Amino acid sequence: MGLIGHPIKQTYSPFIHNVAFDLKKVDYLYLPFDVPAANLGNAVKGMVALGIKGFNVTIPHKVNIMQLMNNISDEAAGVGAVNTVVNDLGRLSGYNTDVYGILKTLDKHKSILAGKEMTVAGAGGSARAVIYTLIKYFKPAQINIINRTEQKAEALKKYFSDKMKFEAIKCYELLSSDLVDVFQRSELIVNATPIGMYPETDDAVISLEKAFNKEQIVFDLVYNPSKTRLLSIASKQGAKVINGTEMLVNQASKAFELWTGEIMPVPDIIRSLEMMIDT
């Protein structure tokens, strides 16, 4: 097993899967492979030639790898991105386990969030998975997409309007003067960007305390540090905050199951990962 992406030096996927393999006593090894965009096709051919049973896919390959798949799951087709590949004797099937990870993390709050206004920061592969999951399972009244470039956000708006017939999307630039009001009225705020990730821990998509309130859930997909600046600011205003650790392990657990047929011991992995991040 392995991970292809560029760059990948910050990834915790090898730790998660190798600990899980050890706990489940299955004879697999998970390795990271740094693959620049120009080498994607050759890298996938190499994985097949080596008989690697499956691998994860991260930035910048999640969209482009779709054209190399023999089969694509409904979730991956809906999101427009693949993050997990299963190799069955050279026949490649692409999945998006981020959807499972996001749903598993937020499902306990579904009764509070369903039908409400939500805000997603980011317009990349992770944001795609978040928006797809929210539309399909939470039926939001409105989704606000915030991004450095409004053009990318507008492209995502069009994608989900065409793909899922969801029209209630508004787009904003990251530096828009409307952001405080947008955040303040949102029941759910999701950071699907790397802003605030180690080592840039002083950064946040928004750092104004008045953007948050105690009625909100603020979910940061960043997992290192375990409490980002965004979450620290939001929690001081009484918001319920969720870091990216649970989502990371949940999405990995679905990939683990696809590859091995085994169930990942998720609580044990989360504890092990939190201990490593906090040391």
Image: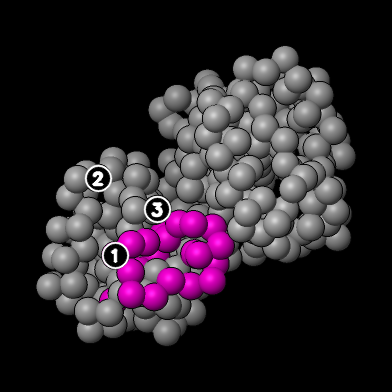
**Of the pair 208 and 138, the residue shown nearer to us:** 138
Q: Earlier in the sequence, mark 2 or mark 1?
A: 2
Disc 1 is placed on an element classified as helix
Q: Give me the C-alpha separation between circle 2 and circle 1.
A: 14 Å
Q: Give me the C-alpha separation between circle 2 and circle 3.
A: 11 Å
Q: Which residues are magenta?
A: 66-87
Task: Locate residue 109, reporting x and y percent.
Answer: 79, 57
Task: Locate residue 38, reporting x and y percent.
Answer: 19, 45
Q: Is residue 71 magenta?
A: yes
**Of the pair 38 and 20, the residue shown nearer to us:** 38
Quadrant assignment for the C terminus = top left
Q: Residue at x 67, y 18 (%)?
A: 176
- What label sits on residue 123 in the rendered view? none
**Of the pair 130 and 71, the residue shown nearer to us:** 71
Disc 2 is placed on an element classified as helix
| 221 sits to left or right of 180 | left
Please rate how many residues cluster around mark 3, counting C-alpha atoms within 10 Å: few if below 14, some from 14 to 19, many from 20: some
Where does label 3 land, which residue? 63
Where does label 1 land, which residue? 68
Where does label 2 land, which residue? 37
Q: How is the model colour-coded?
A: one colour
| 17 sits to left or right of 32 | right
Amino acid identity at mark 3? Val
Task: Indicate whether 18 appears above or below 261.
Answer: above
Amino acid identity at mark 2? Ala
Amino acid identity at mark 1? Leu
